[in-house]
Image (cartoon, rainbow, N blue to C red):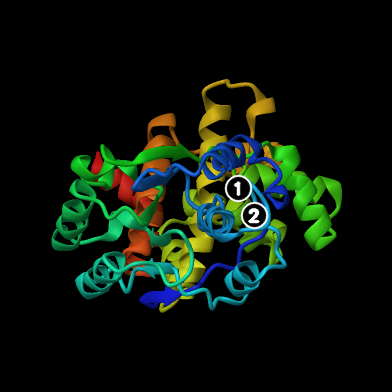
């Protein structure tokens, strides 16, 4: 990832353009209407939920002087937020595995200076859990004695990784997965998907619109079916299939991440079926029998271990872990030869 400490990187849209987030945007409307702000907000919840876009929308509502509790989209502040040139907004992102200490120091230095033209400055850190300890401690000092004209928005999908002393000084705003119907409707409108395909993708993504948008760019149904075939082959043929898959993703963490994004719900469904769960709870309802057949050689314990490892390896990829290594870690444990060795 590229490091950024950018001015006006908003690209915001009005609160009404976030269907499914009414509870969150209502909180924003009340905060902006009252004009009383907490020094820091912690936006937390699953990844790819649109937290960064809503942070920009929240900032736009703070900056806009034309509409109370929202933003008009037409005034000078709104236009410059949309174009990415508003001077009192900063987005700080990670470089490699971490947000660099120098970007945090630059942000803190700017936070101590009066806004250029808005009543407040807004600084967004995404993901805030990727600050090194020195950077986190520097931010903590500011939050202990906050500047009256600066607001910090910390975005994370791992709130447990935020320093407790920082977390306790933030107003927490949780982002929960959206209803499948809401995500499916968005996909049908944005990508002209058939209702059945849109519903399947919404389920696969667990109600996360950002992930749904990402997977919709490819032939996700065919890719999902290939993942099911891989599990069947691993259970039957063993190591050769594992190394074939790991070779395909060599040098491409994005390809490996996409594989895990489809593998995790398949493993979850396989475990649910093996334990006699309600089929209505399946994420891959249209491939119930295929999932059952592909994973019939695995025990519930093996499926649970693979699902847990796949979830962890997906996270490891975000921290620049080796793509082939992560694939092999999850799939090799399901191979007949490896299972025999473990015994």
Left-right relation of 153 to 204: left
Nearest to the observer: residue 39 or residue 287: 39
Name the mark on residue 216. Answer: none
Residue that badge 2 annotates = 212
Crowding at mark 2 (Cα within 10 Å: few <14, some 14-19, many 20+): many
Left-right relation of 156 to 144: right
Whichever of labels 1 and 2 marks the residue nearer the N terminus, that label is 1
Say which element carries label 2: helix
The part of the image, by quadrant, that contains residue 218 is: bottom right
Crowding at mark 1 (Cα within 10 Å: few <14, some 14-19, many 20+): many
Left-right relation of 113 to 234: left
Q: Quadrant of the N terminus?
A: bottom left
**Does the residue at mark 1 contact the one at mark 2 (Cβ under 8 Å)?**
yes
- Residue shown at the point (76%, 44%) measured from the top left: 199
Say which element carries label 1: loop
The part of the image, by quadrant, that contains residue 305 is: top left
Residue 133 to residue 9: above or below:
above
Residue 229 is at least partly visible in this image: no
Q: Position of residue 188 (x, y in %)?
A: 82, 54
Q: Position of residue 260 (x, y in %)?
A: 49, 56
Nearest to the observer: residue 201 or residue 228: 201
- Residue shown at the point (36%, 55%) measured from the top left: 152
Q: Distance between the residues labelled 1 and 2?
A: 6 Å
Name the mark on residue 205. Answer: 1
- Residue shown at the point (68%, 68%) measured from the top left: 75
Q: Where is residue 197 in the image (x, y as percent from the top left)?
A: 79, 50
Residue 75 is at least partly visible in this image: yes
């Amino acid at each position: 990832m590229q490091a950024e400490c950018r001015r006006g990187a908003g690209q915001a849209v009005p609160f009404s353009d976030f269907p499914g987030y009414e509870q969150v945007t209502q909180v924003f409307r009340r905060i902006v209407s009252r004009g009383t702000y907490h020094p820091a907000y912690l936006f937390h919840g699953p990844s790819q939920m649109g937290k960064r876009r809503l942070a920009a929308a929240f900032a736009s509502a703070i900056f806009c002087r034309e509409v109370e509790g929202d933003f008009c989209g037409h005034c000078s502040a709104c236009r410059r937020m949309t174009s990415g040139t508003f001077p009192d907004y900063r987005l700080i992102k990670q470089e490699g595995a971490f947000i660099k200490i120098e970007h945090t120091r630059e942000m803190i230095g700017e936070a101590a200076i009066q806004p250029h033209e808005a009543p407040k400055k807004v600084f967004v850190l995404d993901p805030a859990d990727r600050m090194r300890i020195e950077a986190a401690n520097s931010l903590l000092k500011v939050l202990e004695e906050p500047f009256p004209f600066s607001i910090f928005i910390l975005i994370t999908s791992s709130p447990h990784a935020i320093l407790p002393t920082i977390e306790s000084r933030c107003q927490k705003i949780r982002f929960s997965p959206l209803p499948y119907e809401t995500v499916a409707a968005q996909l049908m409108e944005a990508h002209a998907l058939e209702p059945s395909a849109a519903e399947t993708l919404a389920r696969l993504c667990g109600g996360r619109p950002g992930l749904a948008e990402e997977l919709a760019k490819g032939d996700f149904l065919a890719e999902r079916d290939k993942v099911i075939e891989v599990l069947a082959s691993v259970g039957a043929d063993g190591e050769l299939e594992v190394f074939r898959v790991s070779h395909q993703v060599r040098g491409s963490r994005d390809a490996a991440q996409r594989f895990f994004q489809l593998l995790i719900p398949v493993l979850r469904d396989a475990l649910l079926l093996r334990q006699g769960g309600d089929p209505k709870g399946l994420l891959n309802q249209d491939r119930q029998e295929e999932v059952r057949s592909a994973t019939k050689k695995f025990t519930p314990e093996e499926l649970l271990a693979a699902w847990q490892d796949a979830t962890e390896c997906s996270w490891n990829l975000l921290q620049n872990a080796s793509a082939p290594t992560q694939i092999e870690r999850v799939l090799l444990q399901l191979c007949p030869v490896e299972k025999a060795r473990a015994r």
